[in-house]
Amino acid sequence: MLRPAADADRDTVLAWRNHPDVRAVSLTTHVIAPEEHAKWWDVVLEDPDRHVLIHDDSGVVIFDCREDPPSWSFYLDVEGLGAGLLAGWMRLEKEAVAYAFGELGLTRLGGETLATNKQVLALHRRFGFTEVRRYERLIDGTPQVVVWTERGIPQ
Ligand SMILES: CC(C)(COP(=O)(O)OP(=O)(O)OC[C@H]1O[C@@H](n2cnc3c(N)ncnc32)[C@H](O)[C@@H]1OP(=O)(O)O)[C@@H](O)C(=O)NCCC(=O)NCCS
């Protein structure tokens, strides 16, 4: 089940975010220092337009409602899930979609994924997201293609 993050989750989330596999598919790839993370954490947890949610068995989901349509990002507990990565990921994505259109009452949800991250794009498709546009973004100084996918409320 997804639950709102608490301060006790802060270090766990940093460890998940700093896993090399997660950094490799992120929009900034440096190792995030504890101070940088703590600063971000305090701001995000206080922001009524952002929601950090923990799935204790799988990872973290972040909804950002500051823009229209709202967007989401997520990362998995790669170390902890081990061979159960795909199953954990499907649980997380299913619950994230339900949370967005249920608890948060959103009507559309978008997200950015690196074009090279075929696995995430395939799973997003399976969960009803469609590609809206692709564009270049500088990822640590190197231009890379990013795909914006979106879906609406379940019919
Ligand atoms: C992987 C993913 C979550 C990485 O996102 P990200 O690089 O942290 O970027 P986001 O857009 O979520 O972060 C927004 C900002 O918050 C910062 N931020 C995010 N998490 C942070 C943290 N833990 N500590 C400090 N800063 C953080 C980012 O650096 C970024 O800062 P900027 O706007 O100044 O550049 C995101 O690209 C994504 O959801 N991709 C699709 C799903 C995916 O591939 N998931 C990984 C599967 S394991």
Image (spheres, rainbow, N blue to C red):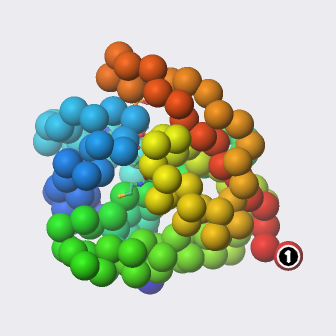
Percent position of residue 14, x then y: 21, 52
Residue at (55%, 24%) from the top-left corner? 136
Q: Residues within 10 Å of mark 1 (few under 14, many from 20)?
A: few
On screen, residue 125 versus residue 121, left or right, reads: right
**Count of marks, rendered view:** 1
Whole-percent x, y for residue 40 in the image: 32, 39
* Mark 1 lies on residue: 155
Q: Position of residue 36 (x, y in %)?
A: 22, 34
Kindly identify the amino acid type of the residue bearing the numbered disc 1.
Answer: Gln
State the residue in front, 55 or 118.
118
Query: In the image, what residue occupies the spot 29% across and 51% down?
Result: 22
Q: As rendered, which of 147 and 6 lies closer to the eye?
A: 147
| Residue lying at the far right of the rendered structure | 155
Can you tell me which quadrant of the image ligand 1 is in? Answer: top left
| Residue sitting at x 20%, y 38% | 32
Front residue (pair 11, 135): 135
Horizontal relation, residue 15 to residue 116: left or right: left
Viewer-nearest residue: 93 or 115: 115
Q: Quadrant of the N terminus?
A: bottom left
Q: Position of residue 145 (x, y in %)?
A: 53, 31
Rendered residue at 17%/37% (across/down):
31
Task: Answer whether residue 121 is visible to the viewer in this image.
Answer: yes
Q: On screen, 96 above or below 117?
A: below
Dot 1: what SS?
loop
